[in-house]
Image (spheres, helix red, strand yellow):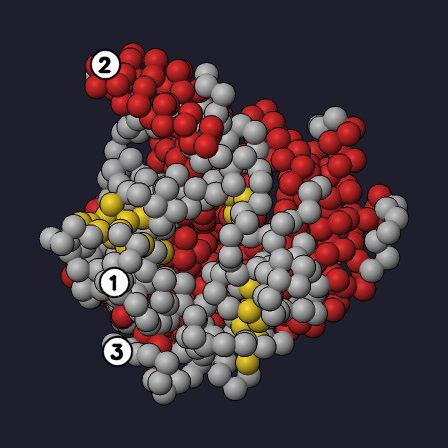
Amino acid sequence: PFWFELQSRALRFHFQLVRAMMQTMHFHLAALAFLLSSSLPVGSAVASREGDACEGDGSMMLQLLHSHSHQGRDASPLCAELSDGRLRRLAGGPYTEEDVGKVACNMAANIFENGTIIASPSRGTEKIHTYPDGSSINQNDYYYMWQRDAGLTMRTLLRVAKGGPMVSKQLENYASLYHEIWSKPTPNKNCWPGRPGDGWCSILGEVKFFVNGSVYNQPWNRAQNDGPAINAMVLMELLSEGKADPTSLENAKVDIIRALNYVGGMGLDSTIDPWEMVYGQHYYVQSIQHRAMAMGADLAQKEGWEGVDNFPLWVPMLSHLVEQHWNVTSGVIGETNARTWFNLQGPKCLSSSDEGANGSTVRTLPCELDVAVLLGSLSARAGHGLGSAVQAVFSPHDSRTLATAYHLVESMAQAYEVNSIDDDAGLPGVLIGRYPGDEYSGVIMEPADSNDVCSGYNCASAWFLATHGLAEFIYASADAAAKGDMKADGMNQGYLLAAMDMALPKAKRGRCKALPRTAKELAEKLIAGGDGVLARAKHHASSDLHMSEQIYRGDDKLPGVTPGEMIGARDLTWSYASLLDALASRADAVEAVSAISS
């Protein structure tokens, strides 16, 4: 709205004026106090031993990365709570306790007190590089609340800091905001299938919202049906805490039932994928829906809710749909079934990352490789609470999931120039993106009618959230190994050897041809491998650990931009949340290793 924009401009002007006049920290804090008073929301590495060819000092690689002081971040009450030491359990590998606090505060800067969580503060006007003709590539406009991103961020917040007074307040405000949003009909009438304006869109399947809580009413790929499942799980956390007032708890119950009835009722239908590009049946969406429904069925039974008779019936239905993503021929879990087109999103084959690949490139199997499979498996894990009796269809340590991860990394790692540069520098780990052949560069052109500097296959770069997701996946493997839940076999051995090698620079990889003899040693080496992956991603963050959406791949895809430079929307909330999730899984794995008797 005009008035919101007018206020925003006024605030930016006053902040710039104060900053120009006052350089000391005292006056910076004064400027911050002014902003916060406005009516607008402001938002141990497991060391390897020196020894034979199977061993190397992976922890030494982490010394290449140094933490820096926290510079100029908004010290909101939520930030203060998250950086008061309560997250020290997450410290380890390349991240110190101080680092963890910085990352948490960077994420908190995108979380508004009224419950709104923006995907990024980027408005689409921030220039990444300007060309001689005056045109520029800019960050994209992400100043909205996406259902998916916001729900995942709240799940992360609750995972790492549940029980803190500011986190509990944030949860209550978030639930209240969603109750208000979901109580209104959507104005949109262009949902798939068809999109002719037939009027069947539901507010529950909406993609994103303006920061004032109104629905984004411009053309977009709708519906996206993982959002209501993710947020139903968030609302279940509110009920389990039981701290909110009776009205809020009752509203949460109503919203959970409504959301899961929508998820189940639409379960057999296709939807838009998490990258918002293709209509079909997606592993990421269906695995999360399965977990949400299992939790909801359990909660409904325990609480004696009415109007939920279908919940226990939808659990096996969704389980069956998830099972269909295993492709026995290619030996991977494919992200998308029932795909309707390839024009916006390629087939994601091994050959999709080849130089010059396009829609006519021969499809070398496996295809439908996507980091969303790893992210979905992590999000759909059975916890210790609601729905724990229903195991995930494909856990992160399932050999089929591990084989998928191996092919996914192989399909992208060699395609990025930035990985070659990092390899030459002796860095451990690897950077990955969303899928082989990814088309989305993450940038927009200014003026808007300028020719895109990159279009088609392989314009996208490595992503922080994808690389963090890979690290978390390796940590989850370590946790399973330590607990005896994962056994080596012919299907997962390639992945396990490659994951251990991530602790080392590329020049030292490939020397170990056999897996460790004990579960403890295997788990330790996997933790070191995950540390290596996080270390490489951290190398590309800013000195105060700001993280954008992507890490530029190079290969002259965006002329003038330096390989390894951060591009895309700045301060992506999901980048921070994915890192905190990875560190939480690391802590779980370290504890599991510690529990093994010597």
The image quadrant that residue 379 belongs to is bottom right
Picture residue at 34% right of the left edge, 13% below the top: 30
What's the distance in space between the residues labelled 3 and 2, CA to CA? Answer: 52 Å
Q: Which mark is residue 451?
A: 1
Where is residue 530 shown, x and y percent of the image? 38, 55
Residue 237 or 220: which is nearer the viewer? 220
Q: Is residue 122 visible?
A: yes
State which tag comes first along the sequence, 3 or 1: 3
Residue 591 or 116: which is nearer the viewer? 116
Residue type marked 3? Gly
The image quadrant that residue 348 belongs to is bottom left
Question: Horizontal placement of 514 versus 18: left or right?
Answer: right
Picture residue at 50% right of the left edge, 76% below the top: 341
Residue type marked 2? Met
Going by the picture, which residue comes out furthest to the left?
132
Rendered position, 164 above or below 378:
above
Residue to which mark 2 is pinned = 22
- Contact between marks 2 and 1 (CB within 8 A): the answer is no
Give the foreground label among 3 and 1.
1
